[in-house]
Image (cartoon, rainbow, N blue to C red):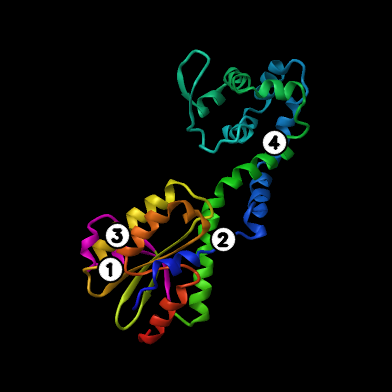
Amino acid sequence: MEKIPFDEFWNTLTETNTTLGFFVDFKKVTKNVESLAIRLNQLNYLLGKENLEEAVHKLFEENPRAFDVSLFEMLVAVRSKGKQMVLDNKRNLRNFSEFFTSADGVWDFITGTGLSEIFRDKKISNLVDYVFGVEVGLDSNARKSRCGKLMAEQIKKRFRDANIDFETEVNSTEFPDLTRLGKDMKRFDFVVKTSAKTYLIEVNFYNASGSKPNEVARAYRELAKEILPCENYEFVWITDGRGWRASQNKLKEAYQEIPNVFNLSTLEKFIENLRTEKL
């Protein structure tokens, strides 16, 4: 298919694919907090205690399961399943889980992280509400993956509207004749098969600039070189977003080397080509 000039591709990059529902997945946040709520309410017993160390020992003696490492990880905005490594007050290397085998260990954790002052002064009135806020903050870190998922959903809709059959998340091992990729498994976002070709498609969207777009451009240039000699396959890259604005040269290099690169505005040309081939 005839390639669109880079300037046309560049000038039609989309500003954003962000919707109002992009920022926080409140359903996920609520579900995560509800799974911890009962145990967090047990820890509310510690809030405002003047002799906090004594209260920790008393609660631990009565119910050591109240001191679940996952709860305290959330209080310091960490997700490691107890594997986070730190230096204790004696400069010994320990993981989070090791602090929660005894009341003394719990106390070391609470004082070392600064939670003791927060608990004692009752700067937190309810740990359930506090963890809800932490979950919202941690969920904002997932925005980059949501950005990619939104792009993938847009591509799915465009294909479905055009009555194009496709598969998603297809491993390269599904194509035993594609030996040039070597033994390393590659997972393609989309695969479209026609009577003429099998199109191996990667999709992404960048709302922000950074090193990631440059790394992806370089990786896909190499991937395209490996797939290009394979007569029955074609590599297709669908990418968009203002995050490319700071990486025009890198994108242009990739655009010139990869035969099939489209954005959301130019994607129709690829779809038209698929229509001309027997699906």
Nearer mark to the viewer, of 3 and 1: 3
State the CA–CA distance, disc 3 to disc 4: 49 Å
Specify the amino acid type for callout 3: Leu
Q: Residue at x 54, y 23 (%)?
A: 99
Residue tagged 1 = 175
Q: Which mark sits nearer the N-terminus, 3 or 1?
A: 1
Specify the amino acid type for callout 1: Phe
Specify the amino acid type for callout 4: Leu
Q: Secondary structure under badge 1?
A: loop
Q: Are marks 2 and 3 in contact (CB under 8 Å)?
A: no
State the CA–CA distance, disc 4 to disc 2: 42 Å
State the CA–CA distance, disc 3 to disc 1: 15 Å
Is 178 in the magenta?
Answer: yes
On screen, residue 127 versus residue 152, left or right, reads right
State the CA–CA distance, disc 2 to disc 1: 36 Å
Q: Residue at x 72, y 20 (%)?
A: 55
State the CA–CA distance, disc 2 to disc 3: 27 Å
Given the current orientation, which residue lies at the most extreme top position?
A: 90
User: Can I make out residue 67 in this image?
Assistant: yes
Residue tagged 3 = 223
Residue tagged 2 = 15
On screen, residue 155 versus residue 233, left or right, reads right
Instruction: For label 4, count other residues whose C-alpha is less than 10 Å away and answer few (under 14), some (14-19) or many (20+).
Output: many
Nearer mark to the viewer, of 2 and 3: 2
Quadrant in which the N terminus is drawn: bottom left
Image location (x, y in percent) of residue 268: 46, 77
Q: Secondary structure under badge 4?
A: helix
Image location (x, y in percent) of residue 75: 64, 33
